C-alpha cells in the first residue's frame, strides 16, 4: 500500500494554509472549481480522513517542511497583487 501523509493537524490549520497559499495563487478560483489539482486533492482529503498521497504531499512542499504550521506551497503561482503587497511589506 502506498504511503499516505496528513499535512494538517486539523481543519483550522488547513484553512490557514489555504489562505496563505491558495487564495494568493493565480490558480485560485473563489467562484468555482479550482484550476489546481493539489487544492482539489486537499479538499477531498478535508472531507475524508485528511490523508494525501506522497505525490500530493511532495507537490505541496510538505515533505520538505514537516513540522511547520504554514509553509509555502511547492506549486504556488503568486498573484501580482500578492507580490506587490509582500514587496511593500518587506522593503
Image (spheres, rainbow, N blue to C red):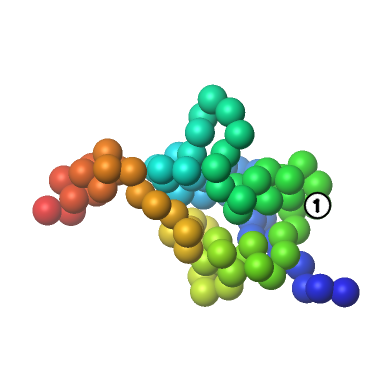
Q: Quadrant of the N terminus?
A: bottom right
Q: Residue furthest right?
A: 1
Q: Is residue 60 above or below residue 88?
A: below
Q: Describe residue 21's horizontal placement relative to residue 15 as left or right.
A: left
In which quarter of the view is residue 15 placed? top right
Number of labelled discs? 1
Q: Is residue 35 above or below residue 4?
A: above
Residue 21 at what x, y percent from top left?
A: 45, 49
Label 1: which secondary element: loop
Q: Residue furthest top?
A: 31
Which residue does the image show at 64% across and 62% down from the upper left?
56
Binning the other alpha carbons within 10 Å of mark 1 as few (below 14), some (14 to 19) or many (20 upward) gives few
Residue 39 at what x, y percent from top left?
A: 60, 47
Which residue does the image show at 23% across and 42% down from the upper left?
85
Q: Is residue 84 visible?
A: yes
Residue 27 at what x, y percent from top left?
A: 47, 43
Which residue does the image show at 18% across and 50% down from the upper left?
87
Which residue does the image show at 74% across and 50% down from the upper left?
45
Q: Is residue 71 visible?
A: no
Q: Residue furthest front?
A: 35
Q: Is residue 38 above or below residue 27?
A: below
Q: Describe residue 87's horizontal placement relative to residue 34 as left or right.
A: left
Q: Which residue is mark 1?
A: 49
Amino acid at each position: 500500500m502506498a504511503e499516505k501523509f496528513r499535512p494538517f493537524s486539523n481543519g483550522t490549520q488547513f484553512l490557514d494554509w489555504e489562505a496563505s497559499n491558495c487564495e494568493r495563487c493565480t490558480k485560485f478560483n473563489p467562484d468555482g472549481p479550482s484550476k489546481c489539482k493539489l487544492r482539489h486533492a486537499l479538499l477531498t482529503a478535508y472531507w475524508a480522513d485528511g490523508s494525501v498521497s506522497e505525490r500530493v504531499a511532495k507537490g505541496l512542499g510538505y515533505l520538505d517542511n514537516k513540522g511547520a504550521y504554514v509553509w509555502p506551497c511547492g506549486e504556488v503561482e503568486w498573484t501580482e497583487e500578492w507580490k506587490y503587497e509582500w514587496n511593500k511589506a518587506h522593503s
